[in-house]
Image (tube, rainbow, N blue to C red):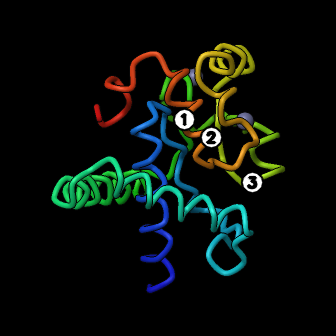
């Protein structure tokens, strides 16, 4: 139970930084345990640390806490439905479908970025995904991603 909680907090922090950057949130992996908590790579640890820093820098404490609460609720809801979400059109995977993940992101960082089709993946690449694809989200890539995203205000969660 504690492991699940830790994992959830990790996702919450990471998704929050995604929200800022106007990047759709990745799907929560529930069914498949990739051992993210027990054997996190250095890249994953760095990413999580950076996400925390970004949140502290850009939000007040109260706002950050509020977002954390909302994200946790949303995360729990998503976990209960257990589905992958297309990062372009944001629709969930249907039972008969099998969304494909961005292989570069997965191979390099074990970051799950799903798309409902090859077309959507191509469509999402240039305007949003290119800036972070396969890259550890350090300050430089985070800034690039923020600059390249067209309207961060319309990101999921609207923040
Ligand atoms: Zn889609
Ligand atoms: Zn990618």
Comparing labels 3 and 1, the label whose residue is closer to the camera: 1
| Residue 65 visible, this orientation | yes
Residue 143, which numbered label? 1
- Structural distance between the alpha carbons of marks 2 and 3: 17 Å
Q: Quadrant of ligand 1?
A: top right
Marks 2 & 1, CB-CB < 8 Å contact:
yes
Task: Give whichever of discs 2 and 3 has the lower sequence position.
Answer: 3
Question: Residue drawn 45% across and 86% down?
Answer: 2
Q: Is mark 1 within 8 Å of ligand 2?
A: no
Assess disc 3: are there few (<14), some (14-19) or many (≥20) residues with their C-alpha within 10 Å of its C-alpha.
some
User: Residue 139, how many percent across, how many down?
Assistant: 58, 46
Task: Give whichever of discs 3 and 1 has the lower sequence position.
Answer: 3
Assess disc 2: are there few (<14), some (14-19) or many (≥20) residues with their C-alpha within 10 Å of its C-alpha.
few
- Residue bearing mark 2: 140
Q: In the displayed structure, does residue 121 sit left or right of residue 18?
A: right
Residue 109, which numbered label? 3
Assess disc 1: are there few (<14), some (14-19) or many (≥20) residues with their C-alpha within 10 Å of its C-alpha.
some
Report the front residue among 116 and 25.
25
| Residue 100 visible, this orientation | no
Q: In the displayed structure, does residue 62 sit left or right of residue 120?
A: left
């Amino acid at each position: 139970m504690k492991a699940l909680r830790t994992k959830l907090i990790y996702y919450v922090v990471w998704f929050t930084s995604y929200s800022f950057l106007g990047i759709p949130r990745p799907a929560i992996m529930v069914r498949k345990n990739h051992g993210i908590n027990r054997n996190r790579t250095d890249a994953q640890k760095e990413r999580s640390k950076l996400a925390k820093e970004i949140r502290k820098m850009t939000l007040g404490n109260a706002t950050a806490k509020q977002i954390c609460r909302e994200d946790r609720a949303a995360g729990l809801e998503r976990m209960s439905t257990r589905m992958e979400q297309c990062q372009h059109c944001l629709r969930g995977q249907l039972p008969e479908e099998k969304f494909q993940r961005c292989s570069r992101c997965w191979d390099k960082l074990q970051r799950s970025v799903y798309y409902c089709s090859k077309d959507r993946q191509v469509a999402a690449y240039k305007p949003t995904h290119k800036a972070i694809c396969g890259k550890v989200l350090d300050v430089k890539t985070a800034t690039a991603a923020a600059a390249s995203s067209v309207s961060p205000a319309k990101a999921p969660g609207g923040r």
